[in-house]
Image: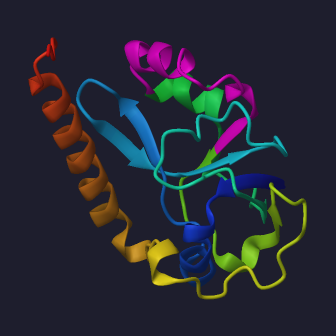
Amino acid sequence: MILYHFTSAAHLHGISKFGLTVGDVVTDIDTFKGKIGVWLTTSETPEGHGLEGSMVDKSEFRLAVDVPENKLLWKWSDWARENLSLRTRILLDTGDVDRSEDFYVYFGWLPAERIMQVTSTKTGRTETDWGRERPDSLLVPGVPFGKRYEWQKRTLRNVHEVLTLMTAQPSGLAN
């Protein structure tokens, strides 16, 4: 089944080395619990996917991925109904995401060989050398499949630290 994954130029080299290995799938927003899964979609455009708010443009490239139809692939709405707390589902559905019926999650590894095409969403051109090295200032290292749990722990810890700092800030910054 061909599905799409959107990403930034900064992530392309790591994906070319390790494939699609990580993604944060929140299961309970109040307890910072989640699973690791690769987000995919049937949509050929990135609008309405909740990709905003990152330090990199996660809508910059569209990867067409040949995804095996096995027990690791879930339609997001079906999986969420069975695995998310009600409050988490409500919060995720009311954010900047309005195309959740188009989403899938793959709870496994999609090697780079499964990426059939990489297209710039800015120019519409197909990237033939998409795994090339980019300047270090643009590079986000990839995550080998065996290190995905370390990545998740670090990500959850970082989110928790940011939220703690945000709630510790005084609400009225006068003067």
Residue at 33% x, 55% y is 152
- Total marks shown come to 0
Q: How is the image coloured?
A: rainbow
User: Can I make out residue 57 in this image?
Assistant: yes
Asked if the magenta segment contains residue 88, the reply would be yes
Residue at 48% x, 47% y is 54
Q: Nearer the viewer, residue 162 or 41?
A: 162
Image quadrant for the N terminus?
A: bottom right
Is 32 drawn above or below residue 87 in the view shown? Answer: below
Is 162 drawn above or below residue 28 in the view shown? Answer: below
Asked if the magenta segment contains residue 95, the reply would be yes
Residue at 54% x, 53% y is 107
Q: Residue 93: x percent and y percent? A: 56, 18
Q: Residue 11: x percent and y percent? A: 56, 69
Q: Nearer the viewer, residue 124 or 143?
A: 124
Residue at 53% x, 20% y is 95
- Decide if residue 61 is on the left or right side of residue 151: right
Q: Residue 40: x percent and y percent? A: 68, 48
Image quadrant for the C terminus?
A: top left
User: Can I make out residue 142 in this image?
Assistant: no
Q: Residue 21: x percent and y percent? A: 51, 66
Is 173 drawn above or below residue 128 in the view shown? Answer: above
- Decide if residue 124 is on the left or right side of residue 173: right
Which range of residues does the magenta coloring cover?
84-104
User: Which residue, as the protein is rendered here, is positioned at the far front?
Assistant: 175
- Decide if residue 150 is on the left or right side of residue 117: left
Q: Nearer the viewer, residue 173 or 135?
A: 173
Is 106 drawn above or below residue 169 in the view shown? Answer: below
